[in-house]
Amino acid sequence: MHQTRTLLDNIFLIIKGLCMGTANKVPGVSGGIVAFVGGFYEEFIYSLQKINSKALKLLLNGRFKSFYQYTNGQFLLLLIFGMLVSYFSISRVLDFFLEKNELFVWAAFFGMILGSIYYISKDFDHWNKRTITAGIIGLAIGISISFLNPATENDNLFFIFFCGIISVSGMTLPGLSGSFILILFGNYVLLLVDSVNALYDTISEVFSGDLSFMDNPERMHTLKILGIFTLGSATGLVTFSHLLSYLLKHYKEISTAVIVGFITGSLGVVWPWKRTIYKTDVLGNVLFDSNGDKIVLNYERYFPNLGNPETWWAILFVVLGILVLLILDWYGKNRKEREQVRTTG
């Protein structure tokens, strides 16, 4: 699965990492879709699978170069670097736009998912009774998850670790949004907003020579939560990669059909035209969690008013989202052609 990469390929890989990190933070969008459409999904899964007992032995024996080559280290490091950068840059910009005009953001991601369904399906010619059944099952599960009601926030460390294991599924399984799973668990704000912001503030203070955060019990508790969540995510990432690599190797057609169905079912999560329903008390007052954020109960979806100019702007963003996927498709085809020329030449 290892490939020879040019400098431009490495730059694009970091950009793909940025996109994966950003997508993972958006409820309803899966970073795995970026990997699938970007043409590096299988390499990503198989590279993660190499983080095993053999890799650990190489590392403990000081054979760092062998460990780096065995685990496809360059690929993983560039991709993970892009993801980390996104959490402190693009994802914060995304938070701003979600707050200012979330309709257009949802519309763009809706278009990207539509484009990804086309991208994955266009070359899939293995439809039969088994794969159609698998696709319907994936579709049913995706739709079911879309309409579940969120739980309340829970900062129990064992539960936080479990959240990490489950939420990372969005990176390995296209169509399953890890951030949306966190909303269902009630911990989206705590783990992907408050914890990340606390880490960002802490790093900024350390670089400015300010270590007062160590005397702040609330900050230290939040950082502890982030650490446990990260540990759970790493555990889930390696565990899921082994399972998915087995499925891709032995049941590739069925797995792809389930993914297509699942992504299609997840469209309900990112439907742009929806109103947020907040949890209220018996008097109708909106309830807030321990961090002062409104508690999301669910979303009320509706069909857009075509007489509203804002609707047509949103549709334009849907088209732009589709175009992003078509550009990625074009880049992937050109990359394959370059690889073939390089191999035959």
Image (cartoon, rainbow, N blue to C red):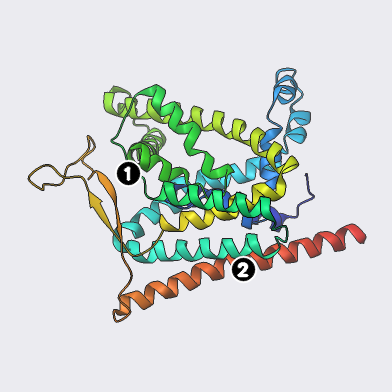
Helix, strand or loop for disc 2: helix
Binning the other alpha carbons within 10 Å of mark 1 as few (below 14), some (14 to 19) or many (20 upward) gives some
Percent coordinates x, y for residue 80 in the rendering? 58, 42
Quarter occupied by the N terminus: top right
Q: Is residue 295 visible?
A: yes
Amino acid on which disc 2 is placed:
Ile
Label 2 vs label 1: CA separation?
36 Å
Tag count in the figure? 2
In the displayed structure, 131 sits above or below 69; it is below
Percent coordinates x, y for residue 17 in the rendering? 58, 49
Quarter occupied by the C terminus: bottom right
Binning the other alpha carbons within 10 Å of mark 2 as few (below 14), some (14 to 19) or many (20 upward) gives few
Q: Disc 2 designates what residue?
A: 327
Q: Quadrant of residue 282?
A: top left
Given the current orientation, which residue lies at the most extreme right position?
345
In the displayed structure, 98 sits above or below 222; it is below
Residue located at (36% from left, 41% from top): 184
Find residue 149 and name its label.
Answer: 1
Residue located at (43% from left, 44% from top): 179
Percent coordinates x, y for residue 258 in the rendering? 60, 49
Find residue 78 and name its label.
Answer: none
Q: Is residue 14 visible?
A: no
Amino acid on which disc 1 is placed:
Asn
Q: Nearer the viewer, mark 2 or mark 1?
A: 1
Helix, strand or loop for disc 1: loop
Ranked by sequence position, the earlier of labels 2 and 1 is 1
Of residues 243 and 132, the one nearer the viewer is 132
Given the current orientation, which residue lies at the most extreme bottom position?
307
Percent coordinates x, y for residue 82 in the rendering? 56, 47
Q: Quadrant of residue 73?
A: top right
Q: Is residue 241 left or right of residue 110?
A: right
